[in-house]
Amino acid sequence: MMDTQDKFCVTNWLYKVGLRPTQQRIELANLLVGNNSHQHITAERLFEKAKEAKISVSLATVYNTLHTFSEAGLLNKVIVDGARCYFDTRLDNHSHFYWEDTGQLTDTPGNFLEIKNLPEPPINSEITSVDIIIRLKEKN
């Protein structure tokens, strides 16, 4: 399944934000960040990966775990539309391409976008982030 080194690293990843490292959290976290590669993943895709890895977990637990990781600041939630939500292991501010033909979410190259003239937020509020998703499809 996973060796002690992976378990230790992922356990620390959870501990640093105050999350209890349950066995299911450790196993799902290892699928997300255990190989140190960046990814955008849906709950359904993580559930498939868990099944492939013979990890016994329900889809509801995967959803809850991803939302818990996001609320703790371990993942960024990227909402493409009301029906599709991705979880991003890359935590810095960056924009995305959403490929409508395949449903894939990828990072845009570089940070060349310039956001200007944002409206003033309502009284007693502040802008915390601006999400940019550029929708693409292949030309015919």
Image: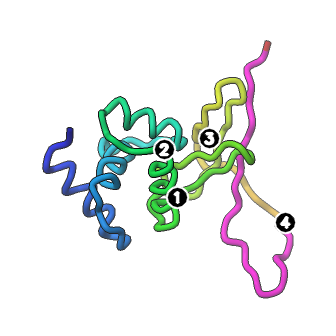
C-alpha span from label 2 to label 4: 41 Å
- For mark 1, what is the residue? 67
| Residue designated by label 2 | 59
Disc 2 versus disc 3: nearer the observer: 2
Q: Residue at 38% of width from left, 71% of height from top?
A: 17
Residue marked by disc 4 = 117
Dot placed on the residue nearer the N-terminal end, 3 or 1: 1
- Amino acid type, callout 4: Asn
For the point 77% across and 87% down, the residue is 124
Which color scheme does this rendered protein use? rainbow
Q: Please state which amino acid type lies under the numbered disc 1.
A: His
Q: Earlier in the sequence, mark 2 or mark 4?
A: 2
Q: Residues within 10 Å of mark 2 (few under 14, many from 20)?
A: some
Mark 3 crowd level (few <14, some 14–19, many ≥20, 10 Å Cα): some
The answer to which of marks 4 and 3 sits earlier in the sequence is 3
The magenta region covers 119-139
* Amino acid type indicated by mark 2: Leu
Regarding mark 3 in the picture, which secondary structure is present there?
loop
- Can you tell which of label 2 and label 4 is closer to the viewer? 2
Q: What residue type is labelled 3?
A: Thr
> Which mark is first along the chain, 4 or 1?
1
Q: Quadrant of the N terminus?
A: top left
Image point 67% across, 65% down: which residue? 129
In-front residue for pair 21/102: 21
Residue 55's image quarter?
Answer: top left
Q: Does the magenta stretch include residue 138?
A: yes
Find residue 59 and report its horizontal and vertical position in percent: 48, 44
Seen from the viewer's position, the closer of residues 124 and 94 is 124
